[in-house]
Image (cartoon, helix red, strand yellow):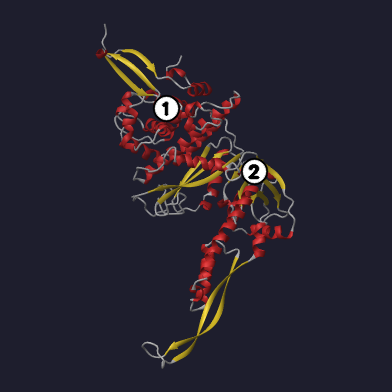
Amino acid sequence: MNHLADFTHESLEVGASPVVQHFLHRLQLQTFFERFLPQVPTGAPEKLSCAATLTALVGHLLLCRQPLYGLRDWFACRVPEHLGLTPTDVAVLNDDRFGRALQCLFDADGACLLTALVLHVIGEFNIEMKRIHNDSTSITASGRYANQADVEDKDRAPRLARGHNKDHRPDLKQLLYCVSVSADGAVPIHFKIYDGNTADDVTHQETWESLRKLVGHVDFLYVADCKLCSRENLNFIASAGGRFLTIVPRTRKEIGWMQQYVQEHEVNWKEVRRQSKKHRTSNCDVIYEGFEYPQPCSDGYRLLWYRSSVKQKEDKASRAERLEKFRTWHQAFQSSAKRRRFVGEEQALAKGRQVVQEQHVSDWISVRVEKHLEVRERQVGRGRPGANTQYERREEIEYELIFEEMPAVIAAAEKFDGLFCLISNDKDITLTDALTHYKYQPFLEKRFEQLKTVFEVTPLWLKDPERIAGLLFIYYIVLLVEALIEREVRQRMKTQKLTSLPLYPEGRPSKVPTTEFVLAAFERHRRHRLIDADGQLVRTFHDPLSEGAVQLLALLEIDPTNFGLA
C-alpha cells in the first residue's frame, strides 16, 4: 500500500499562458527577434538567448506586471513549457538578463524589426489597411536619468524631459508615445517614441511617411486629432497624394467663418447619425446633423460641419453655469468697496480682464472703467475731533470697474452651440462616413487606457534610457497581441453567430469581450502532478475550467490538452 509521504505534489499555474503562446506562435515573435537582434555573446552556450528572454517577457506582461527583479519567482510558479521555456531556462532568469535583453533590443534595427513584424501580422490576420488612426500619449516617469546627453544623434535613446503631460503631471519627466492603429480592430501597426518635450504636431509628417512605406501605397485615409490640422501637415500629405481627416481646432480662422455664417444664413442641416442608446447625460437619442460649408478652406480642403444634440445641450448648460457663477461673484463685488479701490485706469482694466478670464466668461462679459471724482473732508492736525476742529476738503479720483453682459453676443453664441468641424481632402467621402470614421478615434485612445491601467506601463523600474526604450518596444508588442486576441475572439463570435460569452463574474454574458476578460477566464487554473519517490510521474490532473473558458478554447482553436481536456 502506497503512502502519501511517498509522493510529491507539484502544483504550477497554467492560467492563460497557452492562449498567449498560441498568438505569439502565430506572430513568430521569437523568430523575428532572432533575425533582427544583434549577434552578441550573452554568456555560456546553455544560457537563455535574448530572443527567448524577450519573448518570455512579452508573455509575462500580457498576464501580469512585476518588476524585473520579481520575474524569476513569477516564472518559477508557472508551467514553463506554456511560456516557451524549459525548467533550465527558468533557473537562469534574473533581472540582469532581462535588462541585457532590453539593451540588445535597443541596439537592434528597430525600424526593420517593426516593419517585418507588422507586415507578417497584416498577412497572417488579414488586417484591413484602408484607414489608419494616429494619436499619442505621455509615458510619465519619476526620478533622475543618466545618459541624457543633449546631442543630436539619430541613434540615441529618446530623452526624458518635461513637456505637455497628458497624465496631468507637469512636474514629472515624460516620453511621447506615438501609436497608429488600423480601423480593423484597432490593431497597432506602427509606433515611435519621441523626446518628452516634443510637440504632437511635428510627429505627423514622419508618421505618415512611415505608414506609406509600410502599406506600400498612399491610398489610405489618415485620421488624427486636431494637432494634425496645420497647413504644413495637411499640405505635406495632400501633395504626396495622400488623404486625411481631422478636426479643426477653435483657433483656425475657418471657425470664424462658420460663426458669421450661422448668424446670417439659415443652415440646411441634415441628419447623418443617430445613436438610439441612452447617453450618459441624456435620456434622449444622440443626433448628429451635418452640413458642408459652401466654400473650401484657403488651401482647397473640404469643411464638414456637424451639430451634436448632446454637445448642444452641454455647451448651453456650461455657458449658463459659468455666467451664473460670475453673477454671484459680481453681486458680492458690487456691494464691496473694492470696486472703486484702483489708483489708475490701467490697473482697474487689467483686474477686470483678469477676472473674466479666470471665470471663463470673457466672450460674453464686457469690461470698462468709470472715472469718479470724490470730495472728502479730512481733519487738520492730530488728536480727537472737537468743537474747534478744522477740516479741509480734498478731491480724489477713483476708478470703478463696470461689468456688463452682452445679450446679443450670448444669443449669437447659442446658434453655435454643439457645432464642430472636420476637414478633409477626400473628395468622395460623405458627411456620414467622415463622422463615422472620426468617431473610431476613441478606440485608439482605449489602447492607451489599457496600456496605463491593465498593463501598468508605469512605474518603469529602469534607470537606463536605452533599456526604457527597449521596454516600451516590448509594450508595443503587448498592445499588438492584446488587440489581435480581442479582434480574433469577436470575429469568430460573429462567424459562429454567438451574441455573447459568459465571461463576467457569475457567468454573466459579455457581448464584446476584451482581452482582459478573455485572459481572466483562465485565471488561477493550475496543473497538478503526483511524482513518486523515484521521480516518476504517477498522475497529472488540472483544475476545472469555466464554461466561458471552454468556449474560448473552441473559438480560438487552441489545444485543449494544455488544460487537461480531451
Q: Secondary structure at mark 2?
A: loop
Q: Position of residue 134 (x, y in %)?
A: 55, 44
Q: Nearer the viewer, residue 138 or 40?
A: 138
Q: Is residue 343 above or below residue 227?
A: below
From the viewer's perspective, is 559 left or right of 69? Answer: right
Query: Which residue is found at the position 53% from the left and 28% from the top?
Result: 509
Mark 2–mark 1 contact, CB under 8 Å? no
From the viewer's perspective, is 67 left or right of 339? Answer: left
**Quadrant containing the N terminus in the rendered view:** top left
Question: Which numbered disc, 2 or 1, marks the residue that appears first in the sequence?
Answer: 2
Q: Is residue 119 above or below residue 319?
A: above
Q: Nearer the viewer, residue 73 or 36?
A: 73
Q: Position of residue 377 (x, y in %)?
A: 47, 87
Camera-side mark, 2 or 1? 2
Q: Which residue appears farthest toward the bottom when viewing the image?
A: 388
Q: Position of residue 380 (x, y in %)?
A: 41, 91
- Mark drawn on residue 284: 2
Q: Is residue 96 above or below residue 89?
A: below
Q: Amino acid at mark 2?
A: Cys
Query: Which residue is found at the position 33% from the left and 21% from the top?
Result: 11
Q: Nearer the viewer, residue 211 or 61?
A: 61
Q: Which residue is mark 1?
A: 523
Please tell me how crowded label 1 is: few (under 14), some (14-19), or many (20+) other residues with Cα within 10 Å. Answer: some
Q: Which residue appears farthest toward the top when viewing the image?
A: 1
Q: Secondary structure at mark 1?
A: loop
Query: Which residue is found at the position 36% from the left and 89% from the top?
Result: 382
